[in-house]
Amino acid sequence: AYDKHSVQAYDEHQVQINQVSYTENLIVSSTGLITPWPIQTLHDLDEGRLKPIFELQPEIILIGHQNLGTLPPFATVKLCHEKRIALE
């Protein structure tokens, strides 16, 4: 099967998708890329900023960030749980 958006490389400053390097926050799904995504920290994750993701009806949301051991706000975790979406 062909992945429309293939992550080819990443490091702490960028991600390369389909031969294009991105340095800003973005949303990657099987149907498209949304960039930039106005998130600076995990604490920015709220219902309004997650709306574009929720519209894609994902089963899982993977958040890449540099702060090991830092969790999203409880309200965000609860919201994803209520929508039956795994948040990692």
Image: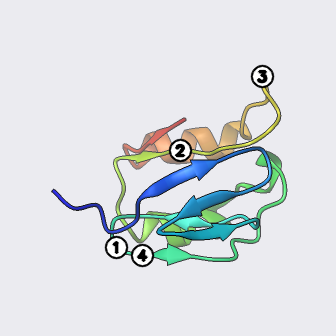
Looking at the image, residue 46 sits to the left or right of residue 18; the answer is: right
Query: Does 86 sit above or below residue 52?
Result: above
| Mark 1 residue type | Thr
> In the image shown, does 82 or 32 lie closer to the viewer?
32
Mark earlier in primary sequence (2, 4):
4
Q: Residue at x 54, y 47 (%)?
A: 79
What secondary structure is marked by label 3?
A: loop
User: Label 1: how many residues lie within 10 Å, few (<14), some (14-19) or many (20+)?
Assistant: few
Q: Amino acid at mark 4?
A: Gly
Q: Amino acid at mark 3?
A: Gly
| Mark 1 / mark 3, whichever is N-terminal | 1
Question: In this view of the protein, which residue sits in the foreground, 36 or 43?
Answer: 36
* Residue holding disc 3: 69
Is the C-beta separation of discs 1 and 4 under 8 Å?
yes
- For marks 1 and 4, give the CA distance: 4 Å
Q: Are marks 3 and 4 in contact (CB under 8 Å)?
A: no
Quarter of the image where the C terminus is located: top right
Marked residue nearer the N-terminal end (1 or 2): 1
Tell me residue 73's x, y (percent): 74, 40
Label 2–label 4 contact, CB within 8 A: no
Q: Which element carries disc 4, helix, strand or loop? A: loop
Mark sitting on residue 16: none
The residue tagged 2 is: 62
**Disc assigned to residue 32:** 4
Q: Amino acid at mark 2?
A: Leu
Mark 3 vs 4, N-terminal side: 4
Vertical placement of 30 versus 67: above or below?
below
Drawn side of residue 61 relative to residue 30, left or right:
right
Q: In which quarter of the view is residue 6 placed? A: bottom left
Labels 1 & 3 near each other (Cβ < 8 A): no
Task: Kindly identify which numbered label has been placed on residue 31.
Answer: 1
